């Protein structure tokens, strides 16, 4: 399975981003804390080269905290600065600014030694569509400053967004998106709502999600849907959910479309609790960043 969101536009967006990189001190790579590997762009390091980078695990408030800690440890062991945030909360500004100051401490000390006046940190936020880039930008600016969307390679006039006194964001000229061959990556993006449900078959998405929940969060399923806990047959589990919720058609047959809809909606709306869909140990060795 190979999926590309906007074939043909990657080169354009990449060129625009590389042209603007010289204007910033640091790059913020925004990832979904529930799926840090699946929501990353495999070409990120190649694109930004040696520019300092801070990984921001967004939506940490809806990810499994125990798994998120594993990811924090994973990145820190690799010497990669990383923080967690919820893009909707104002404390994100403090966390991002403090982490940036630490990363750029040596750079700014050299500038000071040369007699240069103190200035705000200049940064660029990069991330795949729907990971929360525009939400975070607008929240940091405390206004609707970013007009980003899912359209790739949107060329706009250079725009600096002031965030209090210590941080300025360069509105990115385009978005990054993944090309992925791994089924697991595509399903993770689909389950969390990062790509349209229509890109992959809905029944495949649900069976993947259910399989993962059975393996990692069986108690959540039992509690939420009052299940028996017999998970050997996934279709039987879907039948049990449908029967318990009353999703039945004439003749007593389970309406699977309704079961799929409720299960996917409740995964995304945290009705099943805070969930993560991948562990650092899931990353193929050849793909480690």
Image (cartoon, rainbow, N blue to C red):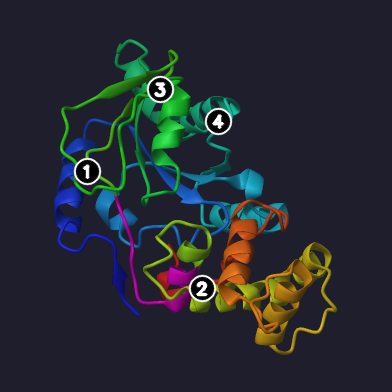
Taking depth in this image into account, of 135 and 22 the one nearest to the observer is 135
Secondary element type, mark 3: helix
Quarter-wise, where is residue 163 in the image? top left
Are the residues at dot 3 and dot 2 in contact (C-beta closer than 8 Å)?
no
Instruction: Read off the residue under disc 3.
Output: 109
Question: Left or right: where does residue 19 sit relative to residue 170?
Answer: left
- Residue 38 rendering spot, x and y as whole percentages: 46, 63
First of labels 4, 2 by sequence position: 4
Mark 4 residue crowding within 10 angstroms, few (<14) / some (14–19) / many (20+):
some
Are the residues at dot 1 and dot 3 in contact (C-beta closer than 8 Å)?
no
Q: Quadrant of the N terminus?
A: bottom left
Instruction: Read off the residue under disc 2.
Output: 205
Q: Which residues are magenta?
A: 176-187
Taking depth in this image into account, of 169 and 76 the one nearest to the observer is 169
First of labels 1, 3 by sequence position: 1
Q: CA distance from mark 1 to mark 3?
A: 27 Å
Instruction: Read off the residue under disc 4.
Output: 92
Q: Residue at x 30, y 32 (%)?
A: 147
């Amino acid at each position: 399975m190979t999926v590309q969101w906007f074939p043909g536009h990657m080169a354009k967006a990449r060129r625009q981003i590389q042209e603007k990189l010289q204007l910033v001190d640091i790059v913020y790579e925004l990832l979904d804390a529930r799926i840090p590997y699946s929501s990353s762009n495999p070409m990120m390091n190649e694109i930004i080269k040696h520019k300092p980078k801070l990984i921001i695990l967004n939506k940490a408030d809806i990810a499994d905290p125990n798994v998120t800690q594993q990811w924090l440890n994973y990145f820190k062991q690799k010497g990669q600065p990383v923080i967690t945030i919820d893009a909707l909360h104002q404390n994100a500004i403090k966390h991002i600014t403090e982490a940036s100051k630490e990363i750029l401490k040596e750079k700014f000390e050299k500038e000071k030694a040369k007699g240069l006046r103190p200035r705000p940190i200049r940064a660029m936020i990069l991330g795949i569509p729907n990971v929360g880039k525009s939400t975070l930008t607008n929240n940091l600016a405390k206004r609707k400053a970013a007009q980003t969307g899912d359209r790739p390679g949107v060329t706009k006039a250079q725009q600096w967004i002031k965030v209090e006194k210590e941080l300025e964001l360069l509105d990115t000229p385009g978005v990054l998106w993944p090309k992925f061959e791994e089924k697991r990556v595509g399903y993770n993006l689909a389950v969390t709502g990062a790509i349209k449900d229509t890109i992959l078959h809905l029944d495949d998405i649900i069976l993947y999600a259910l399989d993962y929940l059975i393996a990692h969060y069986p108690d959540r399923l039992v509690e939420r849907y009052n299940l028996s806990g017999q998970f050997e047959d996934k279709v039987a589990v879907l039948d049990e959910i449908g029967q318990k919720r009353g999703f039945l058609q004439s003749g007593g047959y389970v309406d699977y479309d309704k079961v799929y809809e409720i299960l996917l909606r409740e995964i995304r709306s945290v009705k099943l609790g805070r969930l993560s869909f991948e562990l650092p140990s899931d990353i193929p060795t050849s793909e480690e960043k």
